[in-house]
Image: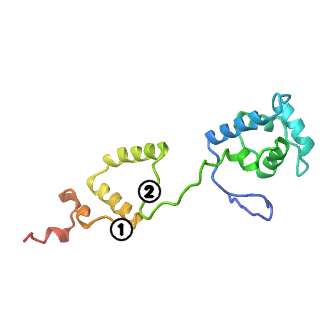
Amino acid sequence: MRVWLSTDYAPNCTIGPMPTSKEKAAFAKRLKDSLPKDIKGGTDLAREFNLLYSSGPAVSPQTAHKWLAGTTIPKRDKLQVLATWLQKDVHWLHYGPTPSGKAKPLARGEKYPMTPETIELVTKMANRFVGLSPRQRNLVEELMTEFDGGTQQETDAAPEDASTTTSKDKGQSAE
């Protein structure tokens, strides 16, 4: 089966990362907090939204319920209608508040602090790394060095045991 993606047939189609469940839940909270008090659920939201939305087919109560439940986030055109109706910034409604303060550029060689998600990922990777054979660990280290721009010192690249030495290395004697 072939899958075609053509903007000729879907001019508003964009490809990007799928929102996470946390992002969808946060959107739903911002939407619910912004709605007028008389909007009680998906049916009310769909009815009011459809009075303002004329760029496509009407939104079903089920779709509006998914917005409120944090199951889906509407497409950009629908977000714009919601933001205008609720007198909110479309970016705020979709993504939440911008980070406070101005982010200063990092100095050369300075690294961003690790987030809890990054720390969790590194921990999982380290646990898997420990289970590798010495040869596999050496290969992973070499690969990481390549991605890091080849900054690993020659002394760090020494194999951990004899199983990683080549036949050429075995033929040479230490003097």
> Where residue 120 sits: x, y (%)?
44, 42
Amino acid type, label 1: Gly
Quadrant housing the C terminus:
bottom left
Q: Which of these two is toward me, 101 or 31? A: 101
Q: In terms of image quadrants, where is residue 158? A: bottom left
Amino acid type, label 2: Lys
What residue do we see at 78% from left, 44% from top? Answer: 88
Left/right placement of residue 96 relative to residue 159 reads: right
> Where residue 61 sits: x, y (%)?
84, 35
Q: Callout 1: helix, strand or loop?
A: loop
Residue carrying label 1 = 150
Residue sitting at the far left: 175
Which is nearer the N-term, disc 2 or disc 1? 2
Left/right placement of residue 76 relative to residue 44 reads: left
Left/right placement of residue 68 relative to residue 123 reads: right
> Does 173 sit above or below residue 94?
below
Q: Marks 2 and 1: CB-CB under 8 Å?
A: no
> Does 90 sit above or below residue 48?
below
Quadrant housing the N terminus:
bottom right
Left/right placement of residue 119 relative to residue 24 reads: left
Q: Which of these two is toward me, 6 or 115? A: 115
Q: Callout 2: helix, strand or loop?
A: loop
The CA distance from mark 2 to mark 1 is 17 Å
> Disc count in the image?
2
Residue carrying label 2 = 111
